[in-house]
Amino acid sequence: ITPDLYLDRRSNNYKALETYLKEENISVFHSLNNGFSLPEERICSYISTVHSLYPLDHKEMVDSAYYKKFHTALPQAVERSNKIIAVSPFIKKELMKSFNIDSDKIVVIYPLVSKEMRPLAPGEYRKLLAEKYGIVEDFIYYSGNIHRSKNLTELIKIFKIVSTKAPKVNLIISGSIEGKKEEYFKELMALISKLSLNDRVIFTGIIPKEDMVYFYNRARCVISLSEYDGYPLGL
């Protein structure tokens, strides 16, 4: 089931979800979001997937509301869960280090790559990116969270060096730049202007899921300088 259909995340109201689990006689409930959607009442067996423990040791990098929720919800989820899925051995070690958890309670299951991510013919991806996004030059690609932990400041500085040796290669950055990310985005834009890269660094905003495969196929390389990843990609 989809938890969002049965609970109000903003008010942490789990009553509707609890009622559903009882009425439908559900035997196992799986929370995909670090256990944040587990009901307080024990109704059935609970499984939580943990993707990241970043806020535990990086309070200064997350907003206070999320920090408070993370420090309240995750320990409770760890306690309530019958089993915990960690997305990497690194996250399993982090869980065991931060909480008194038996190793047998944690199972490592790697995320899968969507079948949509597949090799495409050059003519196919070049045509779509040119017509839909106006992208015709070669590019280095970053896709992910526009957050300080992703070291995009350093990425842009490094690209400045690369740009002098590869004048026809741009840097494309995909990800949301709205809401709480706006302040950091403005800092990045100021840096881009200072380095005279206004025409070389392109922010696309959020790319529709079905278009991601075209960007990955077209990119000269995909890069990530993140200082913390629960499941780092070998890019």
Image (cartoon, grey):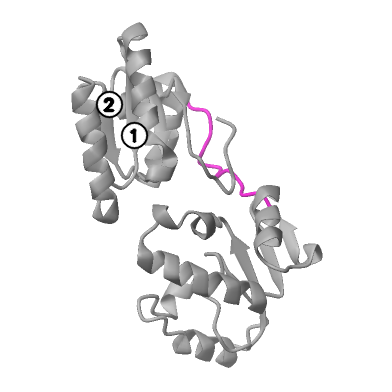
Would residue 46 be visible to someone looking at this image?
A: no
Q: Which mark is residue 173?
A: 1
Q: Are marks 1 and 2 in contact (CB under 8 Å)?
A: yes
Q: Which residues are drawn in magenta?
A: 109-120
Relative placement, left or right, of 88 versus 31 is right
Question: For the point 53% across and 88% down, which residue is it?
Answer: 18
Task: For the C terminus, give its image quadrant.
Answer: top right
In the image, is residue 114 part of the stretch drawn in magenta? yes
| Type of amino acid at the residue the image marks with label 2 | Val
CA neighbours of label 2 inside 10 A, class few (<14), some (14 to 19), many (20+)? many
Mark 1 and mark 2: span between their CA atoms?
Answer: 8 Å
Residue position marked by numbered label 2 in the rendering: 201
Kind of residue at disc 1 = Ile
Q: Residues within 10 Å of mark 1 (few under 14, many from 20)?
A: many
Pick whichever, 213 or 109, lies toward us: 109
Q: Is residue 209 left or right of residue 164?
A: right
Q: Quadrant of residue 114?
A: top right
> Secondary structure under badge 2?
strand
Tell me residue 212's x, y (percent).
41, 38
Give the residue at x 56% y 42%: 115
Q: Please state which of residues 76 and 113 is positioned toward the viewer in this rendering.
A: 76
Return the residue found at the far top. Answer: 165
Task: Tell me which secondary structure the magenta stretch mostly adopts.
Answer: loop
Query: Looking at the picture, how far across and down is residue 106, in whole percent?
Result: 73, 62
